[in-house]
Amino acid sequence: MAVPFFLGSFAIDMCVGSLILHMWSKSERLHTQMFAPAVASGLICGDGIWSVPSSFLSLGNVEPPMCLRVFDADTNYEVEQFLATLPIPQA
């Protein structure tokens, strides 16, 4: 469970989780008191479980799919322009 603490994105996760918990406690106080520790533990463990394979993939220089990449502004504009030219499939 300690892996997310070492990878650095945990502060953002904690902030978002705290905001969600605050909003949840305003709407359903009893359920929040009963289930918040279990939900938090599950989310922390889930983040830690994904962090291990993610670390191995980054060690192997595996490139993420395009939908997960972060581009600079110019490259992002070029990608958006390219995607706009693609035909939209009809269902």
Image: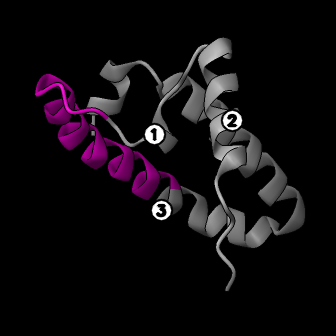
Q: Which residue is mark 1?
A: 66
Spatial separation of the CA atoms under disc 2 and disc 1: 12 Å
Amino acid type at image mark 2: Glu
Q: Is residue 66 shown above or below 4? A: below
Q: Is residue 61 located in the magenta-colored stretch of the structure?
A: yes
Camera-near label (2 vs 3) is 2
Quick one: which residue is furthest to the bottom in this view? 91
Residue at 59% across, 27% down: 12
Q: Which residue is mark 3?
A: 38
Q: Is residue 56 shown above or below 75? A: below
Q: Secondary structure at mark 2?
A: helix
Residue 82 percent across, percent down from the top left: 63, 38
| Mark earlier in primary sequence (3, 1) | 3
| Mark earlier in primary sequence (2, 1) | 1
Residue 24 percent across, percent down from the top left: 78, 59
| Residue 53, picture quadrant | top left
State left or right for residue 26 relative to residue 37: right
Q: Which residue is mark 2?
A: 80
Spatial separation of the CA atoms under disc 3 and disc 1: 34 Å
Residues drawn in magenta: 40-63
The answer to the question of whether label 2 and label 3 lie on touching residues, with beta carbons closer than 8 A, is no
Amino acid type at image mark 1: Met
| Residue 5, picture quadrant | top left
